[in-house]
Image: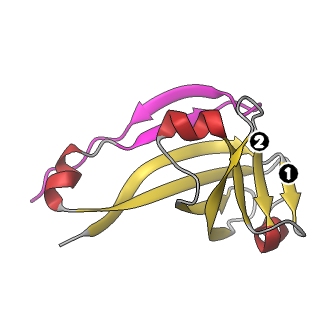
């Protein structure tokens, strides 16, 4: 059986742009993608910490070192520049894969630099 579990997360990123007339997606600084293991076109769940809105979209690659976290298309209507966002990426895994999965979590500074990288430990199957 496959289960959908957390693969990686960017926690408390600052939204730098909201472009409703741009092709839909979320643009994320390429350095952040590399640091947590997310990829272009991966599906992500994005939560707005200000108003509780959540949406699913896919990733566009942003300029490395830019700090860009930008909501595009319809998603831009649910976020404002300066909002804090949590970006979660999930993966389908077997129980065996889950046992060795240690999701990478980037805890962000205000300027979208990484303050801390941590990993979540799996709970033993019971």
Position of residue 48 measured from the top left corner of the image (x, y, whole percent) = 70, 59
Q: Which residues are magenta?
A: 103-126
- Which mark, residue 91? none
Residue 32, image quadrant: top right
Residue 51, image quadrant: bottom right
Q: Which residue is mark 1?
A: 17
- Give yes or no for contact between labels 1 and 2 (Cβ–Cβ under 8 Å): yes
**Vertical position of residue 34 compared to residue 74: above or below:** above
| The residue positioned farthest toward the top in the image shown | 115
Residue at left offset 53%, top offset 59%: 42
Tell me which colouring the rendered structure shows: secondary structure
Q: Quick one: SS at disc 2?
A: loop
Residue at left offset 63%, top offset 67%: 57
Q: Is residue 6 left or right of residue 105?
A: left
* In the image, residue 38 lies in the stretch drawn in magenta: no
Q: Is residue 35 left or right of residue 65?
A: left
Residue 91, image quadrant: bottom left
Position of residue 4 measured from the top left corner of the image (x, y, whole percent) = 34, 66
Residue at left offset 53%, top offset 26%: 116
Q: Which residue is mark 2?
A: 68
Can you say which quadrant of the picture contains the C terminus?
Answer: bottom left
* In the image, residue 106 lies in the stretch drawn in magenta: yes
Residue at left offset 17%, top offset 73%: 1
Position of residue 72 measured from the top left corner of the image (x, y, whole percent) = 79, 63
């Amino acid at each position: 059986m496959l289960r959908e579990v957390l693969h990686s997360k960017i926690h408390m990123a600052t939204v730098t742009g909201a472009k409703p007339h741009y092709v839909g997606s979320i643009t994320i600084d390429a350095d952040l993608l590399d640091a947590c293991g997310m990829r272009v076109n991966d599906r992500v769940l994005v939560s707005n910490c200000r108003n509780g809105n959540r949406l699913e979209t896919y990733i566009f690659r942003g300029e490395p070192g830019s700090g860009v976290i930008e909501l595009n298309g319809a998603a831009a209507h649910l976020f404002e520049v300066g909002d804090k966002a949590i970006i979660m990426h999930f993966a389908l895994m077997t129980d065996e894969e889950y046992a060795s999965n240690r999701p990478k979590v980037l805890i962000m500074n205000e300027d979208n630099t990484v303050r801390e990288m941590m990993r979540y430990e799996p709970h033993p199957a019971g």
